[in-house]
Amino acid sequence: MAAVHPVPILCSGRILIADDQLHVLQALELLLKSHGYATHTVTDPKHVLHALQSNQFDVVLLDLNYTRDTTAGGEGLELVSQIRALDEHLPLIVMTAWSSVDLAVEAMRRGASDFVQKPWQNRQLLEKLEVQVERRQAIQVQQRLRTDELQEAREIQNNLLPREIPALPTYEIAGTTKPVRFVGGDYYDVVSLSPTQVALCIADVSGKGMPAALLMSSLQAALKPLLEQFLPPRELCRRLNRILCELTPVGKFVSFFYAVLDGEQNRLTYCNAGHNPPIVVRADGAAGELNAAGAVLGQFPDWVYEQSELALNRGDRLVFFTDGLVEACNPSDDAFGEAGLLQTVRSCSSESAPDLMNRLMQAASDHCAGRFQDDASLIVVKAV
């Protein structure tokens, strides 16, 4: 390999060097430390992933040939794939003394950032490292900015959800949401309309992440002034649908359920715009669905919505939910389902609405081992 000569490149960064030849490691350490780099070395490819999981590095400098496969680079290529699966952005420079165009192409195809042939030229290697360190640091800055932006978006979205659930005599009401990402496309609200009436609504925007969150924000902005007009559920859904048809991109839509709970008359008046039918479980355990069918919002501007009514009695429970709750799957792809939801509700007949809500979320989480595939939201109402 080339002798070590000073070159006018000074940088800083943390480099993981993986090579099974001690003299190569020593030469690379001497070269890189003299140019401001911190280094960590491993001689066994089995230790590379452990080092990456235990420490932060700016670049990996990886030999492709080890004792198991000294010329073909197979063991090193496996490591390239494993490293890229662990961190898709970590710069990775591969080295081999048995280089070929095919091996270089395969390493790059698997995710290597660059390629160096042994014996290396010091200037060339340092220049490649400098480029990759700068790339890594730029990515980290972008990631920090994105994380800050997402955190701010999460706080804004949380402020759109109810901070307190309004009280209603003889009824307990509780609600919660669990976004699968920083921000989500689920929405729920409980709004006081009068001392004896509350509006209950739950919605699910198609898609996930920021696009769904932005459309959810548009839904909330359009809904708020409509709530202040004390409209019947079918009329509110009709007007909301007309507004969202002008705002919703092609291929996107919103499922929405809206109801007015009258605590004095013990009656729920509701309209379902393509949403999962809420479940009512009576005090004696009998169950049914609230399925006044209507089209999703944002697709059909002239749709005429209908509404229905439900009489409630002491001990009855209502569960409004988004599909992220019932579609939470275990490793065998078995969904929690309406059956799991109904079983949980029936087993908790004496629970308060907040406790039942927590039990339902926990049951779904236990079913999917905490790995929800979609945003999950829930409103629970209990007549007491």
Image (cartoon, grey):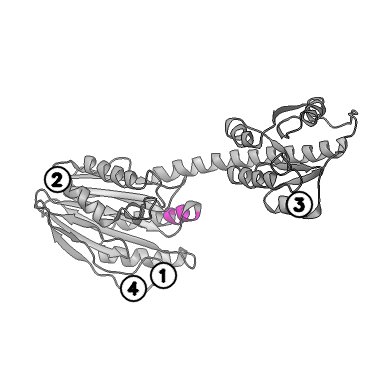
Q: Could you tell me the amino acid type at mark 2?
A: Ser
Residue 236 position (above or below residue 345): below
Work out how far the residue at label 3 is from the one at label 2, CA to CA, in angstroms: 65 Å
Q: Which residue is mark 3?
A: 103
First in sequence: mark 1 vs mark 3:
3
Work out how far the residue at label 2 is from the one at label 1, CA to CA, in angstroms: 39 Å
Q: Which residue is mark 1?
A: 299
Q: Which residue is mark 2?
A: 349
Disc 2 vs disc 1: Cβ atoms closer than 8 Å? no
Q: Check residue 303 in the rendering and tell me which mark sits there, or answer none.
A: 4
Decide which of 62, 178 is in the foreground and name it: 62
Instruction: Tell me the SS state at disc 4.
Output: loop
User: Magenta span covers which residues?
Assistant: 211-217
Give residue 342's position: percent from left, percent from top: 21, 53
Give residue 372's position: percent from left, percent from top: 39, 48
| Classed neighbour count for the residue bearing mark 3: other residues with Cα under 10 Å, few (<14), some (14–19), many (≥20) | some
Decide which of 288, 328 is in the foreground and name it: 328
Work out how far the residue at label 3 is from the one at label 4, CA to CA, in angstroms: 60 Å
Q: Marks 2 and 1: which is nearer the front?
A: 2
First in sequence: mark 2 vs mark 1:
1
Residue 285 position (above or below residue 124): below
Query: As drawn, is 231 to the left or to the right of 83?
Result: left
Secondary structure mostly taken by the magenta-highlighted segment of the chain = helix
First in sequence: mark 3 vs mark 4:
3
Disc 3 vs disc 2: Cβ atoms closer than 8 Å? no
Name the residue at 18% across, 41% down: 352
Disc 1 vs disc 3: Cβ atoms closer than 8 Å? no
Instruction: Tell me the SS state at disc 2.
Output: loop
Q: Could you tell me the amino acid type at mark 3?
A: Leu
Name the residue at 39% across, 50% down: 331
